[in-house]
Image (spheres, rainbow, N blue to C red):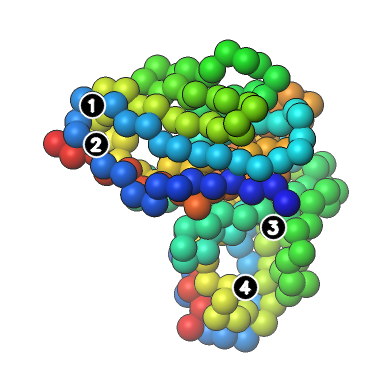
């Protein structure tokens, strides 16, 4: 009965490969996000989708392509992986509503690019 | 630019004592939200407490409370009766628009037995 689930939890891959991280939420939320936590633990938003529509894109390289097939899923595809992509990627969701900014985070996917 | 600053990279406290984690932020917005998140070694991001900028009353959640000073743009977290399970990294976050959290650098808190 996990609220926001990401797969895989760990991902080790070679430079130049293409990989995907999947995210699903069963909370009925309309908005989903991807955040990146770098090696210094700094967290920064990458993307936000509301009802399958992109609403935030924080100058992320176009090698990163989020895809939202429905409002319960937001997957992250990364092309031509680089060493600097190594990080923990967090998916999150929140309910719609002008006064509710509470985010529910998944447990993160640790990506290691060798 | 909107920024969040946590000036204490590491803190420690004895079990059962009280500790305060500092956070300041910079914004020209008048309406926003502030949060404290906890990240234990399990990596999970856990919401600790939430404050709405238009509310003057400081938020409290059991042993956790904040001191929100809007004019000073300060948002500190007080943990009372610290427990070993409070050991974690704590992130202050500012939310100017839906879902876009701007995080501080984090403070690692060690609760000692």
Would you say the residues marked 3 and 4 are in contact, meaning their CB atoms lie under 8 Å apart? Answer: no
Disc 4 packing (10 Å; few <14; some 14–19; many ≥20): some
Disc 2 packing (10 Å; few <14; some 14–19; many ≥20): many
- Could you give the CA–CA distance between mark 3 and mark 4, rounded to whole angstroms? 17 Å
Disc 1 packing (10 Å; few <14; some 14–19; many ≥20): few
Would you say the residues marked 4 and 1 are in contact, meaning their CB atoms lie under 8 Å apart? Answer: no
Residue furthest toward the top?
B57
Who is closer to the viewer here, B105 or A60?
A: B105
The residue that disc 1 covers is: B17
The residue that disc 4 covers is: A19
Query: Residue B20: where, in percent of width, then height?
Result: 37, 32
Residue A35 vs A111, above or below: the answer is: above
The residue that disc 2 covers is: B13
Residue furthest toward the front?
B72
Identify the residue at image location x=82%, y=42%.
A51
Badge 2 sits on which subunit?
A: B
Q: Are marks 2 and 1 on the same chain?
A: yes
Q: Are marks 3 and 4 on the same chain?
A: yes
- The numbered disc on residue A46 is 3
Q: Quadrant of residue B21?
A: top left
Looking at the rendered image, the disc whose residue lies closer to the viewer, 2 or 4, is 2
């Amino acid at each position: 009965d996990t609220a926001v689930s990401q797969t895989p939890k760990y991902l080790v891959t070679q430079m130049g490969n293409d990989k995907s991280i999947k995210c699903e939420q069963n909370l009925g939320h309309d908005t989903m996000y991807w955040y990146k936590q770098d090696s210094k633990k700094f967290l920064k938003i990458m993307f936000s989708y509301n009802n399958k529509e992109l609403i935030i894109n924080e100058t992320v390289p176009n090698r990163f392509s989020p895809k939202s097939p429905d409002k319960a899923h937001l997957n992250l595809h990364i092309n031509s992986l680089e060493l600097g992509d190594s990080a923990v990627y967090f998916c999150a969701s929140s309910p719609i509503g002008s006064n509710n900014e509470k985010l529910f985070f998944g447990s993160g996917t640790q990506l290691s690019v060798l | 630019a909107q920024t969040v600053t946590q000036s204490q990279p590491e803190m420690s406290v004895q079990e059962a004592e009280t500790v305060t984690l500092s956070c300041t932020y910079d914004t020209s917005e008048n309406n926003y939200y502030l949060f404290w998140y906890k990240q234990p070694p399990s990596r999970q991001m856990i919401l600790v407490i939430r404050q709405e900028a238009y509310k003057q009353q400081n938020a409290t959640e059991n042993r956790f409370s904040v001191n929100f000073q809007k004019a000073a743009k300060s948002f500190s977290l007080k943990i009372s009766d610290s427990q070993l399970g409070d050991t974690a990294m704590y992130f202050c976050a500012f939310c100017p628009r839906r879902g876009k959290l701007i995080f501080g650098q984090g403070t690692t808190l060690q609760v000692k037995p």
